[in-house]
Amino acid sequence: EDNARDKFMQETPLPGFETAEKAAAVATKAINDEIARTVRENPLLKPEYERLVALQEKIDQKKKRLKELEATGQPITSADRIPVEWLQTPFYRAYYKAKGWAE
């Protein structure tokens, strides 16, 4: 009886987590809500938060362009690449450099 219950619990997804996409959406919302709460409760963080959001938008624009260039076989110029100082984590610095997307 305990084994059947344990198996049921392991194999039955929680509501909202039926697919990986739904689980990711739930996690994304929870993270974004927590970030918003933290910034709301700590107003001194707001300027840095807004700076980083704007920077991420610039990175996303560059990434979109880089993907288009790759898909069409066009060369990637220095102006297309993401400045490495924009990248906050060592992983993304190394990853984008390895892809030829950052310098």
Image (spheres, grey):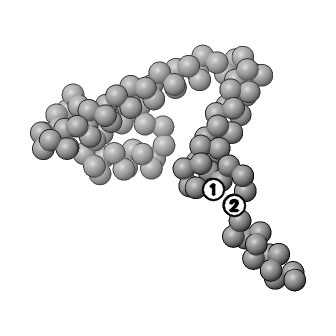
Q: Quadrant of residue 49?
A: top right
- Please state which of residues 65 and 38 is positioned toward the viewer in this rendering: 65
Disc 2, disc 1: CB below 8 Å?
Answer: yes
Which residue is drawn at the image coordinates 12% and 44% (left, top)? 73
The image position of residue 80, as x and y in percent, is 23, 31
Q: Which mark is residue 18?
A: 1
Which residue is drawn at the image coordinates 47% and 21% (left, top)? 54
The disc labelled 1 sits on which kind of residue?
Glu
Considering every residue shown, the one lying at the far right of the view is 1
The image position of residue 103, as x and y in percent, is 28, 38
Q: Which mark is residue 70?
A: none
Q: Is residue 1 left or right of residue 79?
A: right
- Can residue 8 be seen? yes
Instruction: Please name the residue that numbered disc 2 is placed on.
Output: 13
- Please state which of residues 7 and 95 is positioned toward the viewer in this rendering: 7
Which residue is drawn at the image coordinates 19% and 44% (left, top)? 71
Q: Is residue 4 left or right of residue 63?
A: right
Give the SS element for disc 1: loop
The crowd level at tag 1 (other Cα within 10 Å; few <14, some 14-19, many 20+) is few
- Can residue 81 be seen? no
Q: Is residue 54 left or right of residue 36?
A: left
Image quadrant containing the N terminus: bottom right
The disc labelled 2 sits on which kind of residue?
Pro
Mark 2 vs 1, N-terminal side = 2
Q: Quadrant of residue 50?
A: top right
Considering every residue shown, the one lying at the far left of the view is 74
CA gap, disc 2 to disc 1?
Answer: 5 Å
The image position of residue 3, as x and y in percent, is 81, 82
